[in-house]
């Protein structure tokens, strides 16, 4: 253990705690002790403080004991004359630093100094930030909200997102900054940006280079000072609470959880000052190693982190032909040190490729050409054929390319993928076909929306200039189907049609197949199969949660239906989706079978005894945190409400989605509360044991609007075509009283149904 690091971290911690005390005292004097302190859009109070101390801080005054606690963690700077191990003192100082840093940010929120204002920075398209230089003051992201945390949750657990990098400081040059971030994006590593060196931050560097920052591109600008890096650790703390089923105050468990399961590291760019050493010591508490691109002493493994704690990799000394290569090596080193598992398929296209580009938007002004949408047709169709009818790797474009099409023009396009494999089954066709969306979207500068015969694809100018053309769609699909579905697909052949006659012919063939698949899906009921599937993907975060997935009840994240699980089992027979043989039925109405009950016990490690597939009132299925909607009993209304993740407004239960999410998640069985996937709402088996869809008395308007056709069909099925209009939403009721009045007025059927319990 380096005395040098200990000295500087301890000194940094002492200084920051004093700064926090001064700020807090001043704020209490100026604003009053009862002034509320909140981070926006989180149910976890000040998340790091909440996780580490269990305190639900809601006012300035409640921060005082937190700082008193931080003070007890401070130590005198080591004397030059005595040798001590320092590690304990350094870690304590790190924790004190984190408590002080979160306090400071909370006080800054009171003064509206967070999220940090920044000139010319603006939020565009929902979550993407860019610097448009318009001279107006926008602001940076600040802390990550709960909704985003959960939506990343599923990617974090299924491995699409291997971990996160907290970058603090500024790179040697703008070019290096961009390269580092691109390398991380390419590996789908979430990147948090904060800090500066002499006033210059990597956030400035990236925005000067026009790099789009934000949730959609996996790069979140926290703030231009070191203190804002606290948001990364707040995120880590919440991951443990949300997905790990841990409770606030279980500090040691939360830290261990992060060390074991959250693959994160800190990359310190540029000079490291006392405060950065102190913050680094804080990160080490979480098991996150710190890599610096400057000369600093190292800390070798002691068990707190999995590998080294602090690694120095002076930028100029990195082996490489130029700075860009050095940047690439630096990122590789970070990944090695944290043991981050990364899988990247080698996709031969002339643009960067990776899931981090999936959310990218190609605006009309940046567009070279589009297929589908308003002005042209585009479809994609995947089918299996016999092994001898497919030439693996054959990619053919039938018809003209887009060279002749004017800039920002459009043309018709058909993508036909033919696959063959000994383990391929017809049932997997739609599962694989749906992946086309993700695979194509992974190319930087390509935007893909929709599916089947409503696909809509755009190629950006810059992708066009780099030589991206039609055959590259085929290259992407060939590479990704092999890398992701190699277990069931042996051969992949792709034909791209632009020639009108053949395109028409294939479109007709595809539509016939789509019809056939729709019919097959609607005939696929729980009664028609002998096995359901388990999904334990989320156990890496919520160790006791299991989704039981049946044809009529998809996984609560909405990403896995019965066919997906079946395909996944074929691909990976020892993976997270296992068949559950139903065996003898115990109660068909509530949805109990011997097989599901046995599995529930085993899968939940004994936490859950039984699971009713069709009831919210009796032994409902547990939830991990990824649910698309929360269904909750409103006893006064004799029914349930359904709140969607997109809905941030108040609900009649007196809680918003994010507060409810805290109750619904964590792998516990709570009668009356359930997390579900959207499409379960329209299933005939939706809480059928409790009265079914007619129990829905309140529903977020977002669901009513985005699923209006499907809901209309449910209303017809339930024999009341006007049913959806009888259901209240946040626009007409946010309290139980308002809700009851609305239900009376609209004659909601739940009012005259049997008592729900
Ligand atoms: Fe997680 Fe359930 Fe979705 Fe599987 S189906 S990924 S366990 S939420
Ligand atoms: Zn989950």
Image: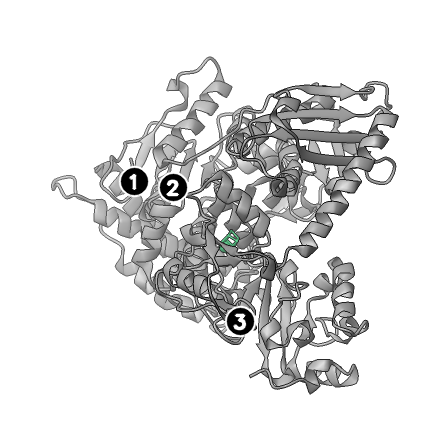
Residue bearing the label numbered 2: 276
Rendered image: mark on residue 673: 3
525 or 689: which is nearer to us? 525
Q: Residue at x 55, y 51 (%)?
A: 142
Q: In this rendering, which labeled residue sits more in front, label 3 or label 2?
A: 3
Q: In this rendering, which labeled residue sits more in front, label 3 or label 1?
A: 3
Q: CA distance from mark 3 to mark 2?
A: 43 Å
282 or 391: which is nearer to us? 391
Residue bearing the label numbered 1: 306
Looking at the rendering, which quadrant does residue 451 occupy?
A: top right
Looking at the rendering, which quadrant does residue 440 occupy?
A: top right
343 or 61: which is nearer to us? 343
Side of 64 where 681 appears, left or right: right
Rendered image: mark on residue 325: none
Q: Residue furthest front?
A: 584
| x and y percentages locating residue 747 in the rendered image | 77, 83
Dot placed on the residue nearer the N-terminal end, 3 or 1: 1
Can residue 315 be seen in this snapshot? yes
Q: Is residue 356 above or below residue 669?
A: above
């Amino acid at each position: 253990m380096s005395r040098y690091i200990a000295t500087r971290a301890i000194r940094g911690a002492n200084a920051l705690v004093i700064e926090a005390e001064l700020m807090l005292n001043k704020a209490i004097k100026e604003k009053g002790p009862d002034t509320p302190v909140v981070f926006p859009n989180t149910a976890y109070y000040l998340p790091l403080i909440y996780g580490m101390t269990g305190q639900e801080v809601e006012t300035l005054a409640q921060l005082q004991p937190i700082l008193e606690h931080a003070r007890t963690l401070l130590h005198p700077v080591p004397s030059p004359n005595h040798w001590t191990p320092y590690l304990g003192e350094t870690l304590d100082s790190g924790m004190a630093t984190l408590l002080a840093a979160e306090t400071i940010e909370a006080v800054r929120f009171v003064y509206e100094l967070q999220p940090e204002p920044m000139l010319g920075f603006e939020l565009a398209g929902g979550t993407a930030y860019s610097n448009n230089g318009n001279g107006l003051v926008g602001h940076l992201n600040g802390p990550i909200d709960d909704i985003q945390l959960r939506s990343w949750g599923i990617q974090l657990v299924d491995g699409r997102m291997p971990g996160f990098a907290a970058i603090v400081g500024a790179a040697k040059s703008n070019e290096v900054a961009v390269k580092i971030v691109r390398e991380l994006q390419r590996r789908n590593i979430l990147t948090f940006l904060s800090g500066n060196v002499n006033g210059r931050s990597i956030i400035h560097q990236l925005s000067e280079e026009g790099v789009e920052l934000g949730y959609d591109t996996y790069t979140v600008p926290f703030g231009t000072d070191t203190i804002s890096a606290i948001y990364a650790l707040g995120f880590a703390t919440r991951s443990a609470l949300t997905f790990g089923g841990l409770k606030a105050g279980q500090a040691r468990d939360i830290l261990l959880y992060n060390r074991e399961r959250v693959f994160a590291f800190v990359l310190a760019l540029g000079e490291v000052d006392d405060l950065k050493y102190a913050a680094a010591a804080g990160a080490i508490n979480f098991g996150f190693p710190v890599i610096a691109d400057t000369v600093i002493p190292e800390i070798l493994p002691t068990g707190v982190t999995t590998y080294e704690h602090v690694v120095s990799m002076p930028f100029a000394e990195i082996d490489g032909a130029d700075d860009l290569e050095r940047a690439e090596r630096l990122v590789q080193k970070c990944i090695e040190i944290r043991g981050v598992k990364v899988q990247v398929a080698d996709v031969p296209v002339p643009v960067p490729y990776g899931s981090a580009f999936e959310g990218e938007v190609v605006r009309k002004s940046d567009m070279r050409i589009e297929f589908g949408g308003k002005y042209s047709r585009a479809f994609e169709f995947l089918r299996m054929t016999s092994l001898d009818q497919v030439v693996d790797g054959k990619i053919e474009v039938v018809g003209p390319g887009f060279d002749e099409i004017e800039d920002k023009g459009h043309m018709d396009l058909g993508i036909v993928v033919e696959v063959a494999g000994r383990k391929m089954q017809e049932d997997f066709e739609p599962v694989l076909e749906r992946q086309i969306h993700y695979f194509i979207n992974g190319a930087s500068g390509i935007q893909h929306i929709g599916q089947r015969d409503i696909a809509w694809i755009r190629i950006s100018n810059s992708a066009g200039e780099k030589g991206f053309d039609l055959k590259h769609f085929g290259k992407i699909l060939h590479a990704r189907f092999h890398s992701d579905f190699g277990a069931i697909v042996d051969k992949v052949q792709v034909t791209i049609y632009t020639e009108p006659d053949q395109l028409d012919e294939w479109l007709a063939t595809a539509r016939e197949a789509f019809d056939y698949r729709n019919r097959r899906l609607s005939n696929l009921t729980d009664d028609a199969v002998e096995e359901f599937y388990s999904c334990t993907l989320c156990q890496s975060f919520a160790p006791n949660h299991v989704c039981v997935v049946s044809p009529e009840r998809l996984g609560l994240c909405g990403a896995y239906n019965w066919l997906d699980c079946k395909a996944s089992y074929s691909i990976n027979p020892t993976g997270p989706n296992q068949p559950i043989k139903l065996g003898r039925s115990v109660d068909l109405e509530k949805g109990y079978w011997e097989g599901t009950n046995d599995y529930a016990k085993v899968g939940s490690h004994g936490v859950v005894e039984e699971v009713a597939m069709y009831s919210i009132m009796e032994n409902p299925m547990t939830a991990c945190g990824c649910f698309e909607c929360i269904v909750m009993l409103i006893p006064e209304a004799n029914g349930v409400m359904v709140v969607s993740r997109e809905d941030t407004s108040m609900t009649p239960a007196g809680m918003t989605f994010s507060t409810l999410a805290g109750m619904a998640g964590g792998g516990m069985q709570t009668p009356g509360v359930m997390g579900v996937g959207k499409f379960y709402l329209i299933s005939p088996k939706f809480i059928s044991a409790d009265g079914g869809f007619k129990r829905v008395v309140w529903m977020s308007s977002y669901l009513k609007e985005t699923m209006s056709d499907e809901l209309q069909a449910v209303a017809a099925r339930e024999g009341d075509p006007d049913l959806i209009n009888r259901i209240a939403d946040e626009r007409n009721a946010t309290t139980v009283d308002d809700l009851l009045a609305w239900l009376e007025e609209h004659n909601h059927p739940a009012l005259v149904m049997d008592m729900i319990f």
